[in-house]
Amino acid sequence: MDTKHIKYLINLEDIIIKKIKIKGGWVNTHSHLDRAYTLTNKNFRYSYYPLKKKWYLVDEMKRLATEEDIYIRMEKALKYFIYQGTQAICTFIDVDEVIEDRSLKAAERLKKNYNKYIKICFANQVLKGVLNKKSKYWFEKAIDFVDIIGGLPAKDNYKKNEHIDVLLRTAKKMDKIVHVHVDQFNNNKEIETEILAKKTIEYGMEGKVVAIHSISLASHKKDYRYNVYKLMKKAELMVISCPIAWIDHIRNENLVPSHNSITPIDEMIPEGIIVALGTDNICDIYKPFSNGNLWIELRFLLESCHYYNINNLVNIASINGLKVLGL
Ligand SMILES: [Zn+2]
């Protein structure tokens, strides 16, 4: 047997990281740097609470945070991403009646000080929704500054469509792209990715809308999943997967197709959907053990989706991220 053409693939991590470097470096498309490193010995116990409770449990920390506190946290996290060779990052920042504009001001300073080292995009987190009077006020206050309009339809539960209408109407008017947290609960009652794709087409926003997470899709039946992929393709809806953020979903007794609680990228990519990578929360009550290591995130993604296409993984971690951020 002729063995001289056999190449041993001993360190796939090195191979992938070298290829990412050639593409300009990592792109972290989803994070919440203004809440990074807010874990304390007092709030650590909140980590066990359900997600919807955490949306309120962060209020205490947010109320007490000064602009300087927020700046220091964001800077610390940003330096870690620069150290890893990250070319671009998107972070959501809370802008609402609790934190008011303090994250916004810290973000402005961060952009001024670090823009020459890393491309930073900001999106507004709408933890209080966008429909009531107060939340609308802060939503409008944020949109001039942010590069990307952020959404969380589950926060305006029972009025998810109206929430998405506000996002898309505003984005269209302002000519901005939209990143929306959808299908986060690993539950086959959720159909937010489908709604978002339909709304994207309705508003003529094809190619300008990004679904963050879309975990629940994996818990639906195959026919439904593939119909949604077709719809996503038609809407040019892109998707961000934050693997570690969701792999911890606790077990339940719902009988659904066997799956990992993760964006089903192994099915989406062959259907022509653009997939990118994000770290989501770092060292806070949402994800106390997450540290923002991008290689660990990519490794989780490839393992939990059984997805080994090296060139596509490299694109997920780099150039697809640029597309998702509109860069
Ligand atoms: Zn998020």
Image: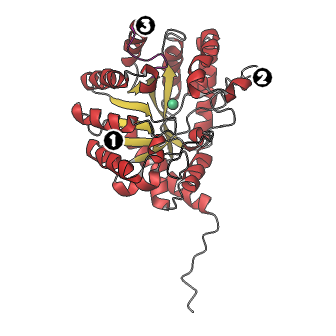
The quarter of the picture where the N terminus appears is bottom right
* Residue at which label 3 appears: 134
The answer to whether residue 128 is magenta is: yes
Counting labels gives 3
Q: Which residue lies furthest to the right in this view?
A: 41
For label 2, the SS is loop
- Decide which of 226, 75 is in the foreground and name it: 226
x 49%, y 19%: residue: 127
The quarter of the picture where the C terminus appears is top left
For label 1, the SS is loop
Give the quadrant of residue 235.
Answer: top left
x 33%, y 41%: residue: 237
Query: Tag on residue 237?
Result: 1
What's the residue type where badge 1 is placed?
Leu
Can residue 114 be seen in this snapshot? yes
Q: Is residue 327 left or right of residue 18?
A: left
Q: Is residue 62 left or right of residue 277?
A: right
Give the quadrant of residue 9.
Answer: bottom right
Q: Which residue lies furthest to the top in this view?
A: 133
Compared with 83, 145 (above or below) is: above
| Residue range corresponding to the magenta coloring | 125-132
- Crowding around mark 1 (Cα neighbors within 10 Å: few <14, some 14 to 19, many 20+) is many
Query: Tag on residue 94?
Result: none
Compared with 220, 162 (above or below) is: above
What's the residue type where badge 3 is placed?
Lys
* Residue at which label 2 appears: 41
